[in-house]
Image: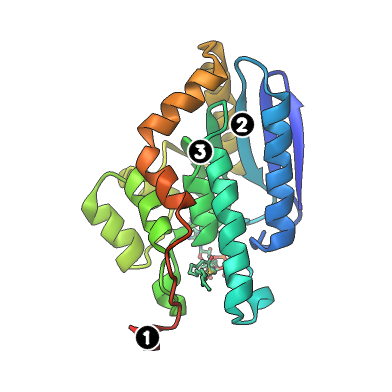
């Protein structure tokens, strides 16, 4: 599950508990209702930090729950699309404090934030589809393309299923800063959030500008026409 607290103008959304924070409908619904509250309670200049307890930020879709049911996979895909769309249209800057592993859909959840700060002593950013014999959704690729500038870095992430440490991710331009501990990672997220709030931007203007800046990926996230044939035998 997740909790939402507010410290001054900063909202803190935390994926709670020591588990893998697998993105099943229960957790995705909980995240989405928290984001709805953030949108309702936002003041002119706010910021959101998303973080997690334990050694995982999110280990991706709950494929055990899906039990290879395409309908259930489609349900998680649809819910994650609306969470990512909510993040990309939120009227405030967003920061992911990646305090543990973020795999596949969990990686996309982190990348859906404007800024990523990450713990360097533990935790990978890991687009694992190749290793688990799944086809990456086109909209996931659109998010990676929008957030990672270098073609070789994108190839390493997607076509090499690289397990990036924070230091690797910083070098490849995937994250904004790397920190030795969970505490320092969260402090860095708070400091960045305060700096952004201090700019005093109107959140709705911020959201409009982000929708211009990331228009292509927002359209990809919201385009559910993509057929995701997730059985390699069909290739
Ligand atoms: C009808 C229409 C149809 C439409 C249908 C639409 C459907 C769409 C479906 C789309 C599906 C495709 C997209 C898929 C999305 C998904 O999310 S699927 C699920 C993805 N999840 C995964 O694949 C899980 C991946 N996770 C793992 O493999 C592991 O959990 C891990 C991340 C590798 C972590 O391993 P773990 O053992 O659990 O953790 P640790 O013990 O912490 O680490 C292992 C070792 O690594 C060392 N280490 C950790 N961090 C670091 C670091 N930063 N630096 C250096 N070393 C590190 C750690 O010390 C461990 O080392 P040892 O102790 O020596 O073992």
Question: The C terminus lies in which quarter of the figure?
Answer: bottom left
The answer to whether residue 123 is seen in the rendering is no
- The residue wearing badge 2 is 48
Q: Is residue 211 left or right of residue 9?
A: left
Q: Are marks 3 and 1 in contact (CB under 8 Å)?
A: no
Residue contact at pointers 2 and 1, CB within 8 angstroms? no
Taking the spot 43% from the left edge, 54% from the top edge, the residue there is 165
User: 163 or 77, which is in the foreground?
Assistant: 77
Label 3 – label 1 distance at C-alpha: 33 Å
Q: CA distance from mark 2 to mark 1?
A: 41 Å
Q: In what element is the residue under mark 3?
A: helix
Residue 137 visible? The answer is: yes
Contact? badges 2 and 3 (CB < 8 Å): no
Lower position in the chain sequence, tag 2 or tag 1: 2
Observer-nearest of 80 and 164:
80
- Report the disc number at residue 212: none
Cβ of mark 1 under 8 A from ligand 1 = no
Residue 234's label in the rendered image is: 1
Task: Name the one closer to the observer, 61 or 77.
Answer: 77
Provide residue 181's location: percent of width, then percent of height.
58, 42
Q: Residue 185: which quarter of the image?
A: top right
Between the C-alphas of marks 2 and 3, the distance is 12 Å
Residue at 46% x, 51% y: name it: 221
Question: How would you rate the neighbour count of disc 3 (Cα within 10 Å): few for under 14, some for 14-19, many for 20 or more?
Answer: many
Q: Secondary structure at mark 1?
A: helix
For disc 1, the neighbor class at 10 Å (few under 14, some 14 to 19, many from 20) is few
Query: Residue sitting at 41 percent across and 51 percent down?
Result: 220
Q: Give residue 88's mark.
A: 3
* Front of the two marks 2 and 3: 3
Identified at 52% across, 60% down, the residue is 105
Give whichever of discs 3 and 1 has the lower sequence position: 3
Q: Secondary structure at mark 2?
A: strand
């Amino acid at each position: 599950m997740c909790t939402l607290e507010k410290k001054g103008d900063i909202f803190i959304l935390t994926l709670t508990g020591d588990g893998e924070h697998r993105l099943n409908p229960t957790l995705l619904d909980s995240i989405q209702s928290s984001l709805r509250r953030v949108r309702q309670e936002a003041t002119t200049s706010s910021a959101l930090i998303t973080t997690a307890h334990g050694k995982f930020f999110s280990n991706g879709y709950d494929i055990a729950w899906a039990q290879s049911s395409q309908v259930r996979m489609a349900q998680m895909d649809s819910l994650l699309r609306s969470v990512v769309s909510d993040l990309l249209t939120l009227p405030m800057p967003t920061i992911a404090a990646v305090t543990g592993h973020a795999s596949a859909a969990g990686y996309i959840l982190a990348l859906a934030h404007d800024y990523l700060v990450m713990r360097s002593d533990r935790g990978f950013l890991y687009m694992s589809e190749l290793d688990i014999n799944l086809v990456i959704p086109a909209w996931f690729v659109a998010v990676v393309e929008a957030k990672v500038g270098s073609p070789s870095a994108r190839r390493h992430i997607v076509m090499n299923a690289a397990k990036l440490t924070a230091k690797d991710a910083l070098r490849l331009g995937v994250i904004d800063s790397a920190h030795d501990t969970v505490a320092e990672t969260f402090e860095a997220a708070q400091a960045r959030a305060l700096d952004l709030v201090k700019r005093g931007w109107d959140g709705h203007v911020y959201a409009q500008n982000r929708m211009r800046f990331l228009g292509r990926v927002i359209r990809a996230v919201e385009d559910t026409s993509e057929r995701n044939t997730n059985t390699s035998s069909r290739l």
